[in-house]
Amino acid sequence: MCGIVGYVGDRNAYEILIKGLHRLEYRGYDSAGVAIVSPSGRINVYKSRGKVSNLEHYCKDKDTAGSTGIAHTRWATHGEPSDRNAHPHYSEDEEIALVHNGTIENYKVLKDALIQNGCKFQSETDTEVLVQLIEYIRTNNDCSLVEAVKEALRQVVGAYAIAVIEKGHPDTIIAARKSSPLVIGIGEGEMFLASDATPIVEYTKDVVYVKDNEIAIVSKNEPLKLVNLNNEETSIDVKTLEFSISQLEKGGYPHFMLKEIFEQPTTLRDCIRGRVVEGGKNIIVSGVLDSKDKFLNAKRIIIVACGTSWHASLIGKYLIQDMCRIPVEVEYASEFRYSNPVLDERDVVIAVSQSGETADTLAAIQMAREAGAYVYGISNVVGSSIPRNTDSGTYIHVGPEIGVASTKAFTGQVMVLTLLAMAIADLRGTMSKEELDKIGAEIIRIPDYVKQTLELNEQIERLSLIFTYAHNFLYLGRGYSYPVALEGALKLKEISYIHAEGYPAAEMKHGPIALIDAEMPTVIIAPNDHLYEKIVNNVQQVKARHGSVIAIVTEGDKEIKNIADYVIEVPDVPECLTPIITSVPLQLLSYYIAINKGKNVDMPRNLAKSVTVE
Ligand code: F6R
């Protein structure tokens, strides 16, 4: 939610900032802006409503010279998307400029106090309060920028990653974080900062993840300095980035989403590498053996997540219950945290989050830890907040996911949850060695099965043309295929803006069946599993009401083929692995429908990749 970038060094800051904003655009794209300390000594701020390309267009004839600057791409929370509300925000005297990712909860109180002291505001944002407060403290206390930032942050309630520049000190950026991500890149005579490492990796692999309540003094010629709000210096832990710039490019595909769908054979191979060994006879998932007692003695597992990660978690529930015989609950993190949950030290809470930054998921696990539960994290972004706030955990290792609609992260999450369930089952002795080995051997083949499924691309593209102008879709599935139905519906609605609902197939009779008519396509996920005969009935119930059915079936299917209007045949895999395979055609179907409608699939309206606000 909002992306920030900063640069200090000898290069042209504007070029680095704009490139960085493009990389962070997945975080928000309502408006964008840059602030650069010009060689003449003033801070030039340029802002524009809309995508980063609008800002670039606007800046074409502007003075963008300078080698220190900050920039922002916004996902609006306080104040509509507009030039005025876009960041950076100036202080009233234009001496300092600030960008912010997060929300200032007590902004109203602070704003009223500043207005009483004669301060005039230009925007409706919570962020402008922060820059005015910093400036007010700086001028009234005659103190340095870093002192003023520190004092202002002591007064602020909320979440923030900020970067501030000052006209009088053009070679330094002051940055700080609390509950919103901030990474600093260390180069030779230059430094970078950003909401994640993607704008930085092109220039340096040495990064420092700023921790909550730390303030960073980021200078061109001085080593990085971190202090806390009590003015104590904190240690600097330099990490090496493990991904490369090529992973951030489209690689010949028209969209990141399509690239990421097609990357899945590779990302799933990366995901199982080192975890499924000895031909599938040994499953190693980090954190499980170290916390053996926790998983052996768990009386219950609660999985917390949001959105697509919640759908993956629901598959995790079926997997863990089936394989480990432990009761599992799956909670929306946003509900769980306010539901006064009953937790104790025999509960294991698993947090699933691609970004590792989702505010509700982070708050849910902080609460679970305080209540004594053991918290295990499954994330994609290395060094992000959720893995840093868990007792143990693992990464899905699918590489940066740029498309706002999650695809490869979903299959990676399901894969890791499968491996986790197998590792716990092995520990608890709830599955025989033979059963585990059989699944292990099939997991090794999954990347190839996904590759084979991707060969359906053209068939699905053709099919998409028939349904592009449908107004509503129903997605049905049972058992492991029910969360796949939910995920298929979410993919379609978020990128094509067609209303779609996912439902457990049998529940259709209790309401949604009333919607079915010749205008309403129903996608039914019906692999050859133990509920196959039941779902055949559901297909018939839809057909009896003249609905058109697109069915995802296993290769060689006989029954549904004769009833459904369109069938998509996917490779035959063990039941517990079907979600990874059946979700792929649904990703493609939603992609092509959205493309046919001319939608921007990588940046759907109103959405942002990383939801760091409540
Ligand atoms: C949908 C999508 C979102 C995310 C959700 C949670 O395609 O990507 O629903 O799954 O915002 O995000 P993470 O996994 O980063 O916690």
Image (tube, grey):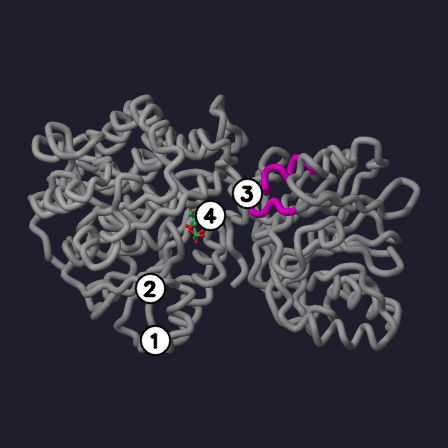
Quadrant of residue 537 within the rendered picture: top left
Name the magenta segment's main secondary structure. Answer: helix
Residue at 36% over, 51% down: 394
Quick check: 141 above or below 351? below
Magenta residue span: 18-30
Residue type marked 3: Tyr
Can you identify the residue that label 3 sits on? Answer: 26
State the mark number for residue 331.
Answer: 2
Q: Amino acid at mark 1?
A: Pro
Q: Which residue is mark 1?
A: 341
Mark found first going from the N terminus, 4 or 2: 2
Q: CA distance from mark 3 to mark 4?
A: 18 Å
Queried on whether the Cβ of the residue with tag 3 lies below 8 angstroms from ligand 1, the answer reads no
Disc with the residue nearer the chain's start (1 vs 3): 3
Magenta-span inclusion, residue 22: yes
Residue labelled with disc 4: 382
Residue 364 image position (x, y, % from top left) = 42, 67
Which amino acid is tagged 4? Answer: Val
The reply to whether callout 2 and callout 3 are in contact (CB within 8 Å) is no
**Residue 18 at least partly seen:** yes
Three-letter amino acid code of the residue under disc 2: Glu
In the rendered image, residue 298, in percent from the top left (x then y), is placed at 22, 68
* Marks 2 and 3, how far apart at CA: 26 Å
